Image (cartoon, grey):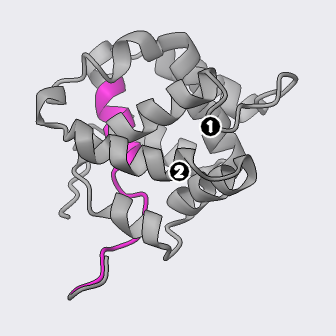
């Protein structure tokens, strides 16, 4: 799937800062963003009508059936671009469907079907600063940032019969 990052240097800077955090801080930042802004993020995302909800839900359902430890590992694998079946399936999704998948994961965390963030979890100073910067962006910039962040995750789909 072709991935084109926005030309907005401010958005690119935020994406790069996010990607420099360790994997668990990246996941936690995603959760804090969802809890503070999530109600409007994915359903209202420009292009949400081009998402494939059935595909995102199918991938989410695969993750939901696993143990909490496996669910966490899958999320880490997506960020690390590990070559696993779910990571390859994710890598073949369109950008908006990837956003929807992460939104479904966040909803699952909220109702504990997906491993929740520990109640006493604290963001690092860098992640807190980035969260505050993201909150100050215009809504369209936030959506672009999230799309640019989730888009390159996952592994490349394999050619032929493999996913």
25 within the magenta span: no
| Residue 138 position (above or below residue 83) | above
**Foreground: 63 or 65?**
65
Residue farthest bottom in this picture: 160
Residue 65 point in image, percent of width and height: 57, 49
Tell me where residue 68 appears, x and y as whole percent.
71, 46
Tag count: 2
Q: Residue 133, relative to residue 152: is it above or below?
A: above
Provide the residue span drawn in magenta: 142-159
Q: Earlier in the sequence, mark 1 or mark 2?
A: 2
Residue that appears at 31% across and 15% down: 139
Q: CA distance from mark 1 to mark 2?
A: 8 Å
Residue 114 badge = 1
Residue 85 percent location from the top left of the image: 44, 72
Name the residue tied to disc 2: 63
Q: Residue at x 67, y 32 (%)?
A: 127
Tell me if 130 is positioned left or right of 146 in this view: right
* Nearest to the observer: residue 4 or residue 78: 78
Q: Quadrant of residue 146?
A: top left
Could you say where residue 147 lies in the image, as x and y percent from the top left?
Answer: 32, 39
Q: Quadrant of residue 163?
A: bottom left
- Name the element at disc 2: helix
User: Contact, CB < 8 Å: mark 1 with mark 2?
Assistant: yes
Residues 62 and 146: in front is: 62
Say which element carries label 1: loop
Seen at 83% across and 22% down, the residue is 119
Quadrant of the snapshot with the N terminus: bottom left
Residue 119 drawn above or below residue 151: above
Which of the numbered marks, if any, corresponds to residue 72? none
């Amino acid at each position: 799937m072709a991935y084109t990052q926005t030309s907005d240097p401010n958005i690119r800077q935020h994406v790069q800062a996010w990607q420099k955090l360790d994997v668990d801080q990246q996941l936690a930042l995603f959760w804090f963003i969802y809890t503070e802004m999530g109600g409007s993020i994915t359903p209202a995302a420009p292009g949400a009508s081009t998402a494939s909800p059935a595909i995102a839900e199918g991938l989410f359902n695969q993750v939901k059936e696993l143990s909490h430890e496996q669910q966490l590992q899958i999320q880490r694998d997506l960020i690390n671009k590990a070559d696993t079946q779910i990571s390859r399936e994710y890598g073949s999704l369109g950008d908006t469907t990837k956003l929807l998948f992460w939104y479904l994961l966040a909803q699952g965390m909220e109702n504990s079907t997906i491993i929740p963030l520990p109640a006493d979890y604290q963001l690092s100073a860098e992640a807190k600063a980035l969260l505050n910067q993201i909150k100050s962006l215009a809504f369209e910039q936030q959506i672009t940032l999230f799309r640019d962040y989730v888009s390159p995750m996952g592994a490349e789909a394999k050619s032929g019969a493999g996913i």
